[in-house]
Amino acid sequence: MTMSANLPNERERSSGAATLAQEPPTSTLPHPAPGTWHHSHVLDLDDFSQEEIELVLETTGTMKEVLARQIARVPTLRGTTVVTLFYESSTRTRSSFELAGKVLGADVINIAASASSVQKGESLVDTVLTLQAIGADVLVMRHPRSGAPYLASRHTRASIINAGDGWHAHPTQALLDLFTIQSHIGDVRGRKVVIVGDITHSRVARSNLWSLTTMGAQVVVCGPPTLLPVGLEGPQGSEVESEQALPPLEVETNLDRAIKDADVVMTLRLQLERQQSGLIPSIREYCNLYQVTEERLATAKPGALVLHPGPVNEGVEISLGVAHGAQSVIEEQVANGVAVRMALLYLLSRGRS
Ligand code: CP
């Protein structure tokens, strides 16, 4: 074939086919990380070793290389069916799983429970069995009840990925948070990570506690005593060995003390209904005491990273300036969500085969 045979003609140029002809080969993954993977499901990170978390992060790096290609498509999961089954609303998690599956060549089906036979009374187990019957290999599931993905995993041959269950866990969020942090500061061992906000009702906080402590970070949780899990409300500034299936961590109800010399500050969304339920006296008082502001951030380490899992209440848990400031990596977190979810889909499919 001569060089000219690869040049696009007029029709190809206008249809975009020319770009395809000029692309570098895209049919393979660039050397995914070797390593041992034992998981049939991803339900939480409390059963992930340091090596397994490192494997996910390394594989995520590979997936970022795929996403950086001009045509980000590989056929790695061709023939695999991924179903997203969401009983709660989502923007980031659901769309990034869909994109992750499609980039890897999987068939992706999206189901919102609000528009499914769940509305006619179908049980969770029946829904899972129905999706298995149509060929689902991976079920990505979000549910308002803690433990629902565990129940599902006992009734199907499909791999279950927990995309958030009640207040319990959101493992893929914690992995993308860790990947984002490490891509800026490297190893988190000994680094101070402050998680501030409504810890009790946060599945994001819970999964982050597992991944960050497993990787050796010094984790401080901070919030009003009414929004800290029972048993963690005090004594202040202490190291707590929780009896509630949480890893050892430090607790501080004063944000000014907590944020001092932090390497990373992770704010959590304040669910505004917490005021109605009497857990905080007023949103204004919460903002005064717990909003991550420019002044407070100035007392953290220079260049400390600011994370937020989203969706963000700007002007409540975080000031507008911090949310959009130079230290914020909130948008990077969202972008990294695609690569992390590609890595998990890949590792689960490798395990299945
Ligand atoms: N962080 C997170 O879970 O966002 P979504 O609810 O938009 O998926």
Image: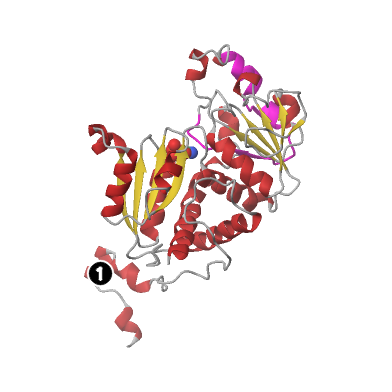
Residue 11 placed where, x, y %? 22, 69
Residue 2 placed where, x, y %? 33, 87
Residue type, mark 1 in image: Glu
Magenta residues span 284-312
Residue 291 placed where, x, y %? 62, 24
Residue 59 placed where, x, y %? 54, 61
Quadrant in which the C terminus is drawn: bottom left
Which of the 4 quarters of the picture holds residue 91?
Answer: top left
Residue 308 at least partly seen: no
Q: Is residue 89 left or right of residue 217?
A: left
- Answer whether residue 237 is magenta in the image: no
Seen at 35% across and 62% down, the residue is 105
Closer to the camera in the image, 90 or 205: 205
Q: Is residue 331 above or below residue 346?
A: above
Seen at 60% across and 23% down, the residue is 227
Instruction: Report the image quarter containing ligand 1.
Output: top left
Quadrant in which the N terminus is drawn: bottom left
Q: Is residue 41 above or below residue 88?
A: below
User: Which element carries disc 1, helix, strand or loop?
Assistant: helix
